[in-house]
Image (tube, rainbow, N blue to C red):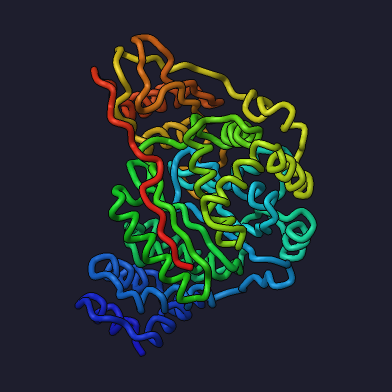
């Protein structure tokens, strides 16, 4: 078998056989297939696509390229959740302890942020002392004793995906639905959960810009999960606006704590409850309507907040931040962005908001960039809000004032202010089930 033959075949839009896909994944992971040939095949896939069967084979080959987490020793149905990435998306910080407080064990491996999207691991590590670099034994022990653990991805979990994603990131081959679906699902399947809830974002701050594209991706991932024996649900949620008001690691932890206290922004609370209802339903706690009520009662009772505190303590985090969340971001200097005119916020560019936060020090432009846990943006106004000239649109937190003007400009360009109040946008477009 020769790699050039696979490239030529896919270039002509012909389907690859299972053994050809495994040859590619195994050879590239082992270093026998050079980057330039792998990049050529990835680009051919972007142009000509993959069949459902090819995508399933690619997913399985990547999931089998390294370790698989065995969660069978933990009683109950283990549920995982994955977001396709957005701005201000801190739902995992709410959902993981919330599900655990409802009796559903959560063993979650999360990633770091890159570019305008944030990463759950970075957010948790903004809590002083919080450890996400746990070995497998420590990870499972915390799940067994606390009911929930959120850690960084194991170095040998789906190594083929890790290597392929790094190549896709620098060759313009990220935005292919078969490649996105197989990348996400290979890690989720290798992580060992019995059921998976997908939060598929759509809008200006997401990979998928329209609900239609997001639905195509969601259905593809649900089908892959079902073929691998997993209970599946996908929720299509809006990312034309950042979720909540806070963008940036420490700021987002503080906002998640607000929601866990029964307060916080309504959009963040609503999306969290919709996702929680699906997680609990897949775990056998009842239909989604009943599970939503269970999640809401658990959130309002403070049980989910206490579960987050227990997880934080088990992972070495300083629990004093629960009493004083401001300590997570008070070391940054604060600046204000004022509205240049009055009217209504008609639209926002979520990606530009994320980019502004990154410029302030909250995100990575490169993989080795150092992030500032206190940096970020607090949005004082969002789509649908009335504003007056000179009113604060946002507060900017940073320790790199030399990039402040650039961040302000990016943030200002993200706002479209007009004379009329816009029509309300849905937070949730659709729910796709695959039990």
Left or right placement of residue 51 versus residue 201 in this view: left
Which residue occupies 60% across, 34% down?
Answer: 259
Residue 236 at x, y = what percent?
Answer: 39, 51
Residue 374 in view here: no
Residue 249 at x, y = what percent?
Answer: 57, 37
Residue 375 at x, y = what percent?
Answer: 55, 30
Which residue occupies 24% across, 17% down?
Answer: 419
Q: Quadrant of the N terminus?
A: bottom left
Q: Please tell me which residue lies in front, 135 or 429.
A: 429
Residue 340 at x, y = what percent?
Answer: 32, 14
Q: Quadrant of residue 356?
A: top left
Q: Quadrant of residue 355?
A: top left
When the figure is inspected, residue 402 is found, relative to residue 254, above or below; the finding is: above
When the figure is inspected, residue 37 is found, relative to residue 389, above or below; the finding is: below
Residue 157 in view here: yes
Which residue occupies 28% across, 84% down?
Answer: 5
Direction left: furthest residue:
12
Left or right placement of residue 145 versus residue 69 in this view: right
């Amino acid at each position: 078998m020769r790699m050039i033959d696979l490239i030529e075949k896919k270039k002509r839009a012909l389907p690859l056989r299972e053994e050809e896909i495994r040859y590619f994944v195994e050879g590239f992971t082992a270093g026998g297939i050079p980057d330039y040939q792998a990049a050529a095949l990835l680009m051919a896939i972007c142009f000509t696509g993959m069949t459902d069967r090819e995508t399933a084979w690619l997913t399985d080959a990547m999931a089998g390229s390294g370790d698989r987490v065995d969660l069978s020793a933990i009683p109950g149905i283990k549920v995982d959740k994955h977001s396709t990435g957005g701005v201000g998306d801190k739902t995992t910080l709410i959902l993981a302890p919330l599900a655990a407080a409802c009796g559903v064990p959560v063993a979650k491996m999360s990633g770091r942020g890159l570019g305008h999207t944030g990463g759950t691991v970075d957010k948790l590590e903004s809590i002083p002392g919080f450890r996400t670099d746990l070995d497998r034994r420590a990870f499972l022990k915390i799940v067994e004793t606390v009911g929930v653990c959120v850690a960084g991805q194991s170095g040998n979990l789906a190594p083929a995906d890790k290597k392929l994603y790094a190549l896709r990131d620098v060759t313009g081959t990220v935005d292919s639905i078969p490649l996105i679906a197989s990348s996400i699902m290979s890690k989720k399947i290798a992580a060992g959960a019995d059921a998976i809830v997908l939060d598929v974002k759509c809008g200006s701050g997401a990979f998928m810009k329209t609900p239609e594209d997001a639905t195509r991706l969601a259905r593809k991932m649900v089908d892959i999960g079902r073929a691998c024996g997993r209970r599946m649900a996908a929720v299509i949620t809006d990312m034309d606006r950042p979720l909540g008001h806070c963008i940036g690691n420490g700021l987002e932890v503080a906002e998640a704590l607000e929601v866990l206290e029964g307060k916080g922004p309504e959009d963040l609370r609503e999306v969290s409850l919709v996702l929680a209802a699906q997680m609990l339903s897949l775990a056998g706690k009842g239909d989604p309507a009943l599970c939503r009520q269970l999640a809401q009662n658990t959130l309002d009772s403070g049980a989910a907040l206490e579960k987050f505190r227990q997880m934080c303590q088990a992972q070495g985090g300083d629990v004093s931040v629960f009493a004083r969340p401001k300590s997570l971001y008070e070391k940054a200097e604060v600046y204000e962005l004022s509205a240049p005119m009055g009217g209504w916020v008609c639209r926002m560019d979520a990606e530009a908001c994320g980019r502004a936060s990154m410029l302030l020090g909250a995100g990575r432009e490169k993989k080795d960039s150092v992030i500032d846990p206190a940096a970020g943006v607090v949005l004082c106004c969002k789509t649908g809000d009335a504003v007056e000239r000179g009113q604060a649109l946002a507060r900017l937190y940073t320790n790199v004032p030399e990039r402040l003007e650039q961040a302000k400009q990016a943030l200002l360009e993200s706002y479209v202010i007009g004379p009329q109040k816009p029509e309300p946008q849905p937070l949730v477009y659709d729910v796709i089930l695959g039990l």
